Amino acid sequence: MSFSSTVKNELIEFENSRKEDVINFKDCCTHAQQYGLLLFCRGFSVSIINMQTENENIAKMYARTIEQITGQVQPIKRSAAGKYSVNVQGEKRRRKVLEYFGHTGSEITLRLNRANLADECCYSAFLRGVFLACGTITSPSKDYHLEFVATHLNLCKDLIKLIEEMELNSKYVMRKGNHIAYFKDSESIEDVLTHMGAISSSLELMEIKIYKDVRNKVNRKTNFENANLSKTVDAAVMQMRAIELIKKEKGMSYLSDELRELAILRLENPELSLRELGQMLSVPLSRSGVNHRLKKITQMADDLKKSEHEKGE
């Protein structure tokens, strides 16, 4: 399974679990996600409303949305190539779908109707729907790249503006007649995944990035034998992963002064040994002392993970 498929499956699971959260569930976010899913599929006009996807669960979500709006069950077709498609048959039904989201079908160009985003909480839900409809992400082990592919220029511009309002910075390119909003830096992609609800995928990307960064720095600065190199990289990755998790979830101020100083040094110097890190501290510390503090940081990160998991249950 591709990383892109993994992300989409996680988003579907996130939406299903969100609906089960009676306290925090909001109908407006469901509406926003449905709007993103339909608006950015292959067709959204009086003449054609349809989608194609390789993910059966997305096709089912699309069909359920159309059924909810029109009251008619939508058949899902599967091609010989394994792609699923859903088509809304009949102009009357298509107009009903358009009107449901405040479109007349007579617009000169397809644009985002902000009336479907009742509150700022809906932005993330809308983006989740857009990604399910037209988003892809490259495996972070190969490259950092996430994109949304739109068929209309103004619609793509509206999406980019919305993304900017979410304090995310995307870029634009036209490719093979399509209009694409994309991200190339890992931190922005992590933020996009987090906004949409793909927390596990965001953490996986972060772990892969840390491993790649550490491996590259260690390769450049050391001549250890392969066994020692692997051991150094694995230890540093585990420590940096814990620090990055604490930083992302709680902020560096969550750590005491002595732990924060060491954590910052480790992030800035992933290739250094524990002894070398200890010598760089404002109050020098032995190798065992540094190891003890790093273990405390790792344990704090493990406790945060456990706490988040328990909340999710």
Image (cartoon, rainbow, N blue to C red):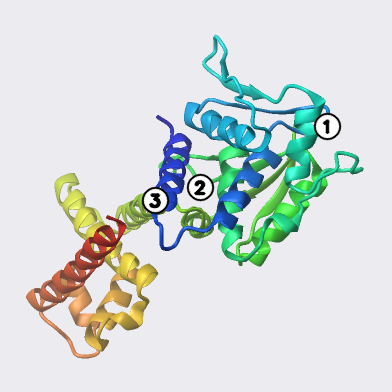
Q: Which mark is residue 127?
A: none
Q: Is the Cβ of the residue at disc 3 closer than 8 Å to that at disc 1? A: no
Task: Point out the residue furthest to the front here.
Answer: 71
| CA separation in Å, label 3 and label 1 | 34 Å
Residue occupied by mark 1: 46
Q: Is the Cβ of the residue at disc 1 closer than 8 Å to that at disc 2? A: no
**Position of 153 compared to 242: left or right?**
right
Q: Percent from the top left, x then y, of residue 105?
A: 86, 39
**Position of 24 compared to 129: left or right?**
left
**Position of 57 compared to 284: left or right?**
right
Amino acid type, mark 1: Val
Q: Percent from the top left, x then y, of residue 251?
A: 37, 76
Q: Is the Cβ of the residue at disc 3 closer than 8 Å to that at disc 2? A: no
| CA separation in Å, label 3 and label 2 | 33 Å
Q: Percent from the top left, x then y, of residue 79?
A: 57, 12
Give the SS element for disc 2: loop
Amino acid type, mark 3: Glu
Residue 108 in view (yes/no): yes
Which of the two discs, 1 and 2, sits closer to the camera? 1
Give the SS element for disc 1: loop
Q: Identify the residue at image location x=39%, y=68%.
A: 248
Which of the two discs, 3 and 1, sits closer to the camera? 3
Q: Identify the residue at image location x=42%, y=48%.
A: 14
Residue occupied by mark 3: 20
Asked which quadrant contains residue 265, the reply is bottom left
Residue occupied by mark 2: 144
Q: Identify the residue at image location x=56%, y=57%.
A: 124
Image: 165 above or below 126: below
Say few, some or many: other residues with alpha carbon within 10 Å of mark 2 (under 14 / 14 to 19 / 20 or more).
Answer: some
**Which mark sits nearer the N-terminus, 3 or 2?**
3
Q: Which of these two is toward me, 71 or 180?
A: 71
